[in-house]
Image (cartoon, helix red, strand yellow):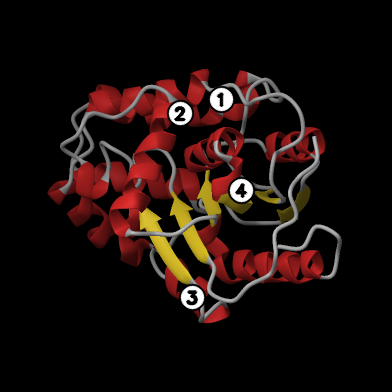
Amino acid sequence: MMRPPIATAAGRTWVLLRGLTRDSRHWGRFVGELQAAFPQDRIVALDFAGNGARYAERSAIRVADMVEQARAGLSHKGVRQPVYLLALSLGAMVAVEWASRHREEVAAMVLLNTSLRPYSTFFQRLRPASYGPILARMALPATPLDWEQTILRLTSNRPDRAILPQWAAWRAACPVRRSNALRQLLAAARYRAPPGPLPVPTLVLASARDRLVSAECSRTLARHGRADCVLHDWAGHDLPLDDGPWVVRQTARWLAEKAGSSEAI
């Protein structure tokens, strides 16, 4: 199936989609870094039901339903399409499903540290070494700070502990219910990508030292999806947190390369 050519234009709209139990605030300084690189573009960060501003809502158990949540969120904000999706982990699964279901709404995707069935095994999609800390936090009483310390250790290879009080305050103000975390985990675990090449131009970025998800998941996705793939050599799962400027540089370089090809973006 041929991908539609996308014309280069000033004033793109970037839609940022986060991963499991995280919300738009967790993009942190990355939003400013992306905006500085593309000053004419609009950047919209969305929350899924159960997270952030929508913490009181019930999370979806299907990635397809998360797509519809995101589409409704854009409609409410008056965002015009097609949009450029930049998405991390579970958010990247939502991006793939969105582009597959509504190809005319998505110009291109940048997918960060994600994993998809049927391309990767369960033990690649969630590395066994991460099970202990996650299960311990879910089984035992924990403060917001306890939770955020565990998440930072698992997702960052250059942890900035100065952000922990802010993260803990966000969790206290907008707590993610355990049932919602499990529903999101179920959505991620059961999601199966549509067969064939990815429907829109796609850049896959991955961290070689990701301790949650094997970088092999991204390599395999790029190979089967006929996408471009670049690996970061030291960052953790939260690639925008550890090295946001690198993500921005790779994205800008990729867009420039595509602009000079038959698959202009």
> Looking at the image, is mark 4 or mark 2 earlier in the sequence?
2
- Give me the disc on residue 111: 4
Give the alpha-carbon distance from disc 4 to disc 2, as whole Å.
Answer: 15 Å
Q: Amino acid at mark 2?
A: Val
- Give me the disc on residue 128: 1
Tell me where residue 117 sits by quadrant.
top right
Verify CB contact (< 8 Å) between mark 2 and mark 1.
no
Which quarter of the rendering shows the C terminus? bottom right
Give the alpha-carbon distance from disc 1 to disc 4, as whole Å.
Answer: 23 Å
Q: Amino acid at mark 3?
A: Gln
- Give me the disc on residue 35: 3
Q: Is residue 259 above or below residue 227?
A: below
Q: Between tags 4 and 2, which lies in front?
A: 2
Q: Between tags 1 and 4, which lies in front?
A: 4
19 to the left or right of 89? left
- Give residue 28's position: percent from left, percent from top: 38, 65
Q: Between tags 2 and 1, which lies in front?
A: 2
- Give residue 21's position: percent from left, percent from top: 34, 39
**Secondary element at image label 3:** helix
- Give me the disc on residue 51: none
Q: Amino acid at mark 4?
A: Leu
The residue pinned by badge 2 equals 63
Give the alpha-carbon distance from disc 3 to disc 2, as whole Å.
Answer: 28 Å
> Looking at the image, is mark 3 or mark 4 earlier in the sequence?
3
> Looking at the image, is mark 3 or mark 2 earlier in the sequence?
3
